[in-house]
């Protein structure tokens, strides 16, 4: 097990979830569920928190998330919690899972 100091030296990687109505959030949370990405880096997700939490619940992933305003805040997150930068560009009311939408597309464009 790594020390807190070792964890703090890991590079922060920002991962955009892609279209919140697509499979990107599901693939992302399933990857994080393995805990392998967190062994190699500190991970911050960029995207709609509702979509991320929905994907985690749907996939049976035991992960916790917290919103952050910037990478500096993400670096402060501890205890295995995944920081998420959610700019509130889109909410689940703006799209339907499995169906493309202009709102989700605009949000995705902004996240990358």
Image (cartoon, grey):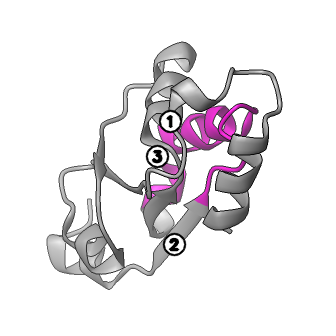
Eyeballing the image, is 107 above or below 29?
Answer: below
Q: Disc number at residue 91?
A: 1
Kindly identify the residue that appears in the image at 49 percent across and 26 percent down: 56
Kindly identify the residue that appears in the image at 32 percent across and 84 percent down: 9
Quadrant of image for the N terminus: bottom left
Q: Earlier in the sequence, mark 3 or mark 2?
A: 2
- Horizontal and vertical percent position of residue 68: 29, 61
Q: Is residue 41 left or right of residue 81?
A: right
Eye-nearest disc, 1 or 3 = 1
Q: Give how far apart the Cα atoms at labels 2 and 1 are.
A: 24 Å
Q: Residues within 10 Å of mark 3 (few under 14, many from 20)?
A: few
According to the picture, the residue beneath numbered tag 2 turns out to be 13
Q: Residues within 10 Å of mark 2 (few under 14, many from 20)?
A: some
* Magenta-drawn segment: 16-38
Eye-nearest disc, 3 or 2 = 2
Q: Is residue 94 left or right of residue 44?
A: right
Kindly identify the residue that appears in the image at 45 percent across and 32 percent down: 50
Eye-nearest disc, 2 or 1 = 1
Q: Is residue 11 left or right of residue 99?
A: left
Q: Is residue 90 left or right of residue 21?
A: left
According to the picture, the residue beneath numbered tag 3 turns out to be 35
Quadrant of image for the C terminus: bottom right
Q: Are marks 2 and 1 in contact (CB under 8 Å)?
A: no
Kindly identify the residue that appears in the image at 66 percent across and 28 percent down: 95
Q: Give how far apart the Cα atoms at labels 3 and 2 are.
A: 14 Å
Q: Earlier in the sequence, mark 1 or mark 3?
A: 3
Q: Nearer the viewer, residue 96 or 63?
A: 96
């Amino acid at each position: 097990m790594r020390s807190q100091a070792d964890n703090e030296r890991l590079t922060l990687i920002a991962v955009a979830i892609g279209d919140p109505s697509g499979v990107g959030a599901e693939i992302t949370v399933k990857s994080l569920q393995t805990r392998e990405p967190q062994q190699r880096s500190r991970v911050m997700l960029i995207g709609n928190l509702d979509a991320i939490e929905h994907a985690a619940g749907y996939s049976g992933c035991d992960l916790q998330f917290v919103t952050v305003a910037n990478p500096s805040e993400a670096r402060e997150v501890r205890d295995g919690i995944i920081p998420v930068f959610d700019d509130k560009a889109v909410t689940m009311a703006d799209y339907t899972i499995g169906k493309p939408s202009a709102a989700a597309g605009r949000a995705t464009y902004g996240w990358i």
